[in-house]
């Protein structure tokens, strides 16, 4: 019994037996740049899905919802932050319309 208590105390002191910290399912993934986020999505994903994923589900350059609040904001942001060959204009427009519809509204 004493050995168990001693081992537990050592484990707690070493941080082994404490609750896990760091990665949790509630953490939002991040990328340094929008291009990095886009490029890191699976190649099998459609370009529109990659745009939507990076706009909605990532912190990009320290900003949550870096693509802005409106469809126009998003199109401008994506145009300025992706290689022009990554997605065509109709694809950007469609992805950004979905983004504007799905993005949580900012609290006032």
Image (tube, rainbow, N blue to C red):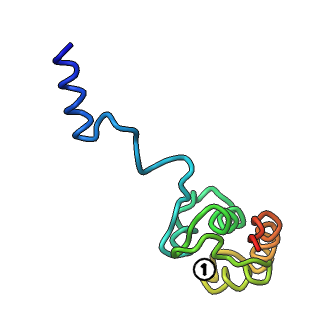
Q: Nearer the viewer, residue 53 or 15?
A: 15
Q: Nearer the viewer, residue 1 or 46?
A: 1
User: Quick check: 19 left or right of 15?
Assistant: right
Please state the horizontal and vertical placement of residue 20, each as a whole percent of the image: 40, 41
Q: Which residue is rendered at x = 28% and y = 37% of the image? A: 16
Examine the rendered structure and indicate whether residue 80 appears above or below residue 48: below
Residue drawn at the location 78% of the way across and 68% of the way down: 105
* Quadrant placement of the N terminus: top left
Q: Eyeballing the image, is 82 above or below 51?
A: below
Q: Where, by quadrant of the figure, is residue 10 drawn?
A: top left
Vertical comparison of 53 with 8: above or below: below
Instruction: Identify which residue, 3 or 39, lies in the foreground.
Output: 3
Q: Work out whether 33 lies above or below 80.
A: above
| Lateral position of residue 33 relative to residue 47, left or right | left
Crowd band around label 1 with a 10 angstrom C-alpha radius: few (<14), some (14–19), many (20+): some
**Residue 95 occupies which quadrant of the picture?**
bottom right
Q: Helix or strand or loop: what does disc 1 sit on?
A: loop
Expressed as whole percent of the image width and height from the top left, the position of residue 17 reads: 31, 33
Instruction: Report the residue marked by disc 1.
Output: 82
Quadrant containing the C terminus is bottom right
**Residue reaching furthest top?**
1
Q: Residue at x 67, y 83 (%)?
A: 77
Query: Measuring 79% from the left and 63% from the top, which residue is drawn there?
Result: 102
The x, y position of residue 76, in whole percent, is 71, 86
Q: Where does the image place residue 65, in percent across and percent down from the top left?
A: 65, 71
Number of numbered markers: 1
Quarter occupied by residue 34: bottom right
């Amino acid at each position: 019994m004493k050995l168990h208590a001693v081992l537990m105390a050592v484990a707690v002191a070493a941080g082994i037996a404490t609750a896990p910290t760091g990665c949790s399912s509630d953490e939002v993934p991040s990328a340094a740049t929008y291009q990095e986020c886009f490029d890191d999505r699976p190649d099998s994903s459609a370009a529109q899905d990659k745009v939507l994923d990076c706009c909605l589900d990532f912190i990009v350059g320290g900003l949550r919802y870096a693509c802005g609040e409106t469809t126009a904001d998003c199109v401008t942001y994506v145009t300025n932050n992706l290689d022009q060959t990554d997605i065509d204009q109709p694809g950007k427009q469609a992805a950004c319309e979905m983004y504007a519809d799905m993005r949580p509204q900012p609290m006032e």
